[in-house]
Image (cartoon, rainbow, N blue to C red):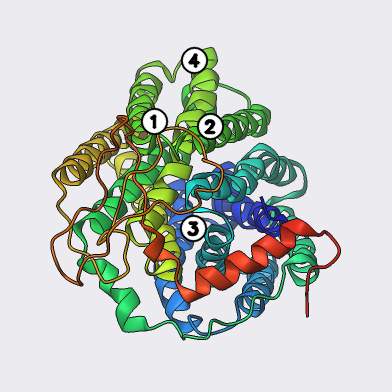
Amino acid sequence: MPLAVYILGLSVFALGTSEFMLSGLLPPIAEDMNVSIPRAGLLISAFAIGMVIGAPLLAVATLRLPRRTTLISLISVFGIGQVVGALAPTYEVLFASRVVSAFACAGFWAVGAAVAIAMVPVNARARAMAVMLGGLSIANVLGVPLGALLGENLGWRSAFWAVGAASAVALVGVTTLIPRIPLPERKPQLKQEMGIYRDRQVWLSIVVTALGAGGVFCAFSYLAPLLTDVAGLDSGWVPTVLALFGIGALVGTTIGGRIADAHLFGVLMSGIAASTVFLVALALLSSYQVAAVALSFLLGVSAFYTAPALNARMFNVAGAAPTLAGATTTAAFNLGNTGGPWLGGAVIDAHFGYAATAWAGAAMMVLALVAVVCSLRLQSRGVSRGVTGSPTAAASPEPSAGPTPGAEHPSGPDSPSGSDSPSGSDSPSGSDSDSPAGSDRTPETETCAAAGTAATKTDTGISTA
């Protein structure tokens, strides 16, 4: 795996800490800003809304800009947003700072994911995304609990200052260690990349991702008050339970990343089903402290177990537009991160209680599972409408096991633009994975792949100019 992919994962640690740390800071923020907890919860939705809007906009705006320069600019803006949040005198200023930070975070995710995917073979995409998501998991293990601990002892603003410092460290890493990737000879065409949205499989991937993320964060966003008001735990336990969720996320990401390339649909269905079961159990058993703590860990495992597969699936069905594929995945995750906390807040405002957020999350998970089944049936029937060069327009089976030496790109016939063709077929060996054809190696991905190969061959010869 190229060193640059690990640097991107390290940067995601700062992004992820900021995105999720509010789940442990809602009570002190609500008290300091003189707002209700559901209204404070809208700060989580504000970040998610910024991610939803910012991901596609910045992907389009930076489509022809150097990838490394774009990453440096975005992590800088993100860090400034954390400082503004730490100094925010009113709820409205804090809300605005979250939206701006989210724009930068979304752009970094979209561009960073496209670079990471481009630097690895097709049959290592889920593992590359698992490295980036590993930064997110570590953020949940260390960053989020540390933020809650800082909020408990030094005030919630100290958590924002800490993330600002982490962003500065990430900026140094990106500036010094991410290789300079030359622009492709053939400029990316926005009209061609936008063609991915004619594919039903792309939209099904968006639905699955949004519902899957929304189901988890409908409950997770209000985990702190659930633990204290329903389970009866002392507030000092909240950072520990958040750390357990993060450890579960790291475990889930590691396992899911290792097997999703070979069994993509199997990972999606088993992970979403498990999350549904855990959410129902949390709704029923949240008043029992041991159960609430254990289920928080298990929910972290199941939620992040599916994350590499969700990312890889989007790149598989939209590989002809790698930057927009990354942006679309980011937007889809954050549609869920917006809708989930909003639905949870509505449930609380309706006086159903904090435990009811888990019921609402489970309902979203059931809908996500239905969408996965629909996607699998479409794929098995060979129904898709894609664009020229898209893996949805020219797909072939992926090996049911790990990477095969020397087989970087599965072969498959190209099909005309706009024609009905499979988005991926079941492999002879019974694999439930999907894979793009070699045609998804666009000029940008070929250039990035070359840069990634150079990065893996030497630790000292990487160009950072």
Quarter of the image where one finds residue 335: bottom left
Q: Which residue is mark 3?
A: 43
Q: Is residue 96 visible?
A: no
Quick one: label 4, few (<14), some, or many (20+) residues within 10 Å? some
The residue singled out by tag 1 in the image is 271
- Mark 3 and mark 4 lie on one chain; the one further toward the N terminus is 3
In this orientation, which residue lies closer to the viewer: 147 or 38? 147
Whole-Å distance between the Cαs marked 1 and 4?
20 Å
> Element at badge 1?
helix
Per the model, the C-alpha gap separating discs 2 and 1 is: 9 Å
Q: Is residue 293 above or below residue 122?
A: above
Which of pointers 2 and 3 lies earlier in the amino acid sequence?
3
Q: In the shown orientation, is residue 57 left or right of residue 207?
A: right
Give the residue type that dot 3 points to. Answer: Leu
Estimate how packed mark 3 is, as few (under 14), some (14 to 19) or many (20 or more) residues with alpha carbons within 10 Å: many
Height in image: 413 above or below 377?
below
* Mark 1 or mark 4, earlier in chain: 1
> Is the Cβ of the residue at disc 3 closer than 8 Å to that at disc 4?
no
**Residue on which the image places disc 2:** 252
Q: Nearer the viewer, mark 2 or mark 3?
A: 2
Residue 291 is marked as 4
Q: Does residue 423 appear left or right of residue 132 in this picture? A: left
